[in-house]
């Protein structure tokens, strides 16, 4: 049985094991609402050709000095630094993930919480693999947009992807959507993750449908453009300060 720890470095351990060929296993994602899911660790090391089209589009739209939030094993940053020759700062709260990023040649990688960044400006802020999930709950969106506004250089932009989870509530017979609004926003999820014999504490993770993102962005002084739709209710959006 997995041991529950307050702050195990689940993704960092898996990323480090894969890089060092130390018998890596899949990361298990637990939710009280759905069956367990698995994240193959090798997926975190994908190259540009192996990435979904939304990610490819986002990387092609990056420019200037780039902040890669929640960089993981650094796949997006490696492409930007090595292939596009752009200045990129990959950050992640996982120290072992950042150690691996540095071993993979990412010279500016930092173990850093996005919300604790100060006194820096970026031309592009990149939040991929549902990077907006770090917001946790809708009530935290104001803090998120305040930090984005603080970190963006003049004429800077934010590129993020997310998913509309309303499809999970579709009725089987008529295809309609039934959502109990009394339970809060349907994109607010709570997860735990496991790797080998370690299990994380529960954490909040947010998925935003595009219309909710657009309304929130405009309410906080950002233009929000739908750049591209994905193949499974996901999308790529670009935000710029008004």
Image (cartoon, grey):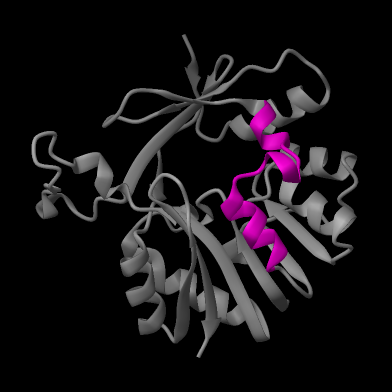
156, 103: nearer the viewer: 156
Residue pictured at 10% horizontal, 53% vertical = 182
The percent position of residue 226, horizontal first and vertical second, equals 46, 69
Asked if residue 46 is positioned above or below residue 225 in the image, the reply reads above
Residue pictured at 37% horizontal, 58% vertical = 208
Residue 215, magenta (yes or no):
no
Number of numbered discs overlaid on the protein picture: 0
Asked whether, in this view, residue 51 is left or right of residue 194, the answer is: right
Asked whether, in this view, residue 87 is left or right of residue 112, the answer is: right
Asked if residue 183 is positioned above or below residue 27 in the image, the reply reads below
54, 95: nearer the viewer: 54
Asked if residue 202 is positioned above or below residue 78 in the image, the reply reads above
The percent position of residue 204, horizontal first and vertical second, equals 39, 46
Q: Which of the 4 image quarters holds residue 46?
A: top right
Return the residue found at the far top: 1
Asked if residue 155 is positioned above or below residue 165 in the image, the reply reads below
Residue pictured at 68% horizontal, 34% vertical = 12
Where are the magenta residues, as a range?
Answer: 42-61
The percent position of residue 72, horizontal first and vertical second, equals 68, 43
Residue pictured at 41% horizontal, 44% vertical = 232
Inspect this view and state whether residue 132 appears: no
Asked whether, in this view, residue 240 is left or right of residue 37, the answer is: right
Residue 57, magenta (yes or no):
yes
The percent position of residue 21, horizontal first and vertical second, equals 81, 18
Q: Which of the 4 image quarters holds residue 219?
A: bottom left
Asked whether, in this view, residue 92 is left or right of residue 31, the answer is: right
Q: Which of the 4 image quarters holds residue 82?
A: bottom right
Inspect this view and state whether residue 164 appears: yes
234, 241: nearer the viewer: 234
Q: Chief secondary structure of the magenta span?
A: helix
């Amino acid at each position: 049985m997995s041991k529950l720890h307050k702050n195990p470095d689940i993704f960092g351990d898996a990323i480090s094991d894969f890089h060092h060929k130390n018998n890596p296993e899949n990361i298990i994602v637990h939710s009280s609402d759905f069956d367990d899911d698995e994240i193959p660790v090798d997926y975190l090391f994908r190259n540009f050709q192996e990435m979904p089209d939304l990610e490819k589009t986002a990387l092609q739209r990056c420019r200037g000095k780039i902040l890669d939030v929640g960089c993981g094993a650094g796949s997006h940053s490696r492409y930007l630094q090595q292939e596009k020759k752009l200045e990129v700062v990959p950050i992640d709260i996982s120290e072992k993930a950042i150690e691996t990023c540095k071993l993979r040649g990412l010279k500016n990688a930092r173990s850093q919480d996005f919300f604790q960044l100060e006194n820096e400006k970026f031309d592009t802020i990149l939040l991929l693999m549902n990077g907006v999930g770090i917001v946790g709950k809708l009530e935290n969106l104001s803090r998120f947009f305040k930090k984005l506004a603080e970190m963006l250089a003049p004429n800077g932009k934010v590129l993020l992807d997310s998913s509309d989870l309303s499809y999970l509530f579709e009725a089987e017979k008529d295809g309609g959507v039934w959502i109990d609004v009394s339970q809060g926003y349907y994109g607010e999820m709570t997860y735990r993750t496991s790797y080998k014999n370690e299990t994380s504490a529960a954490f909040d993770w947010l998925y935003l449908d595009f219309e909710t993102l657009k309304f929130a962005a405009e309410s906080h002084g950002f233009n929000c453009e739908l750049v591209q739709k994905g193949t499974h209710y996901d999308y790529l959006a670009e935000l710029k300060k008004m």
